[in-house]
């Protein structure tokens, strides 16, 4: 699947593998084909963001269970507790290591997430 971000493709890959890990670039709550933001609430954007990440992971035979590190970027500090409830529901235990920061995001996103997943031996 060719992921797009806004009207033009940006100069980075959705994911890049190493010998042992897959590094997934920051994803947001956008339609993966059109690049359009399809929701204006945190829950919908977070669920779609994780779906987009799952699609990228699946292309390498991986799932959210293979994720070992998550970086989260939230637009609004007041969304922290709500985000944690959604995150806990969507990510399997044991949870991966994670970092969460607050910042201004492109494309009117409320959340952006990037992950590092460990490649399975057969996928290496």
Image (cartoon, rainbow, N blue to C red):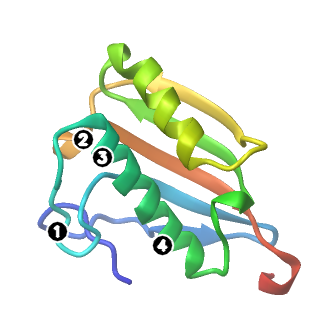
Residue 8 bears which disc, if any?
Answer: 1
Residue found 16% across the figure and 55% down from its top? 38
Q: Nearer the observer, disc 1 or disc 4?
A: 4
Q: CA distance from mark 1 to mark 3?
A: 20 Å
Q: CA distance from mark 3 to mark 2?
A: 8 Å
Front residue of 32/26: it is: 32
Residue 60 on image: x %, y %: 63, 80
Q: CA distance from mark 1 to mark 4?
A: 20 Å
Residue receiving disc 4: 55
Q: Nearer the observer, disc 4 or disc 2?
A: 4
Q: Secondary structure at mark 4?
A: helix
For the residues bearing labels 1 and 4, Cβ distance under 8 angstroms: no
Q: Earlier in the sequence, mark 1 or mark 4?
A: 1
Residue 1 on image: x %, y %: 38, 84
Residue 89 higher or lower than 7, as above or below: above
Q: Earlier in the sequence, mark 4 or mark 2?
A: 4
């Amino acid at each position: 699947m060719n992921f797009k971000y806004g009207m033009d493709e940006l100069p980075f890959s959705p994911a890049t593998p190493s010998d042992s890990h897959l590094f997934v670039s920051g994803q947001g709550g956008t339609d993966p084909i059109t690049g359009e933001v399809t929701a204006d609430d945190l829950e919908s954007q977070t669920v779609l963001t994780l779906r987009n990440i799952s699609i990228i992971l699946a292309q390498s035979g991986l799932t959210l269970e293979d994720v070992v590190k998550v970086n989260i970027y939230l637009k609004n500090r007041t969304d922290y507790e709500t985000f944690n409830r959604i995150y806990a529901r969507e990510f399997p235990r044991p949870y991966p290591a994670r970092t969460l920061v607050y910042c201004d995001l492109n494309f009117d996103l409320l959340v952006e997430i990037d992950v590092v997943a460990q490649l399975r031996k057969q996928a290496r």
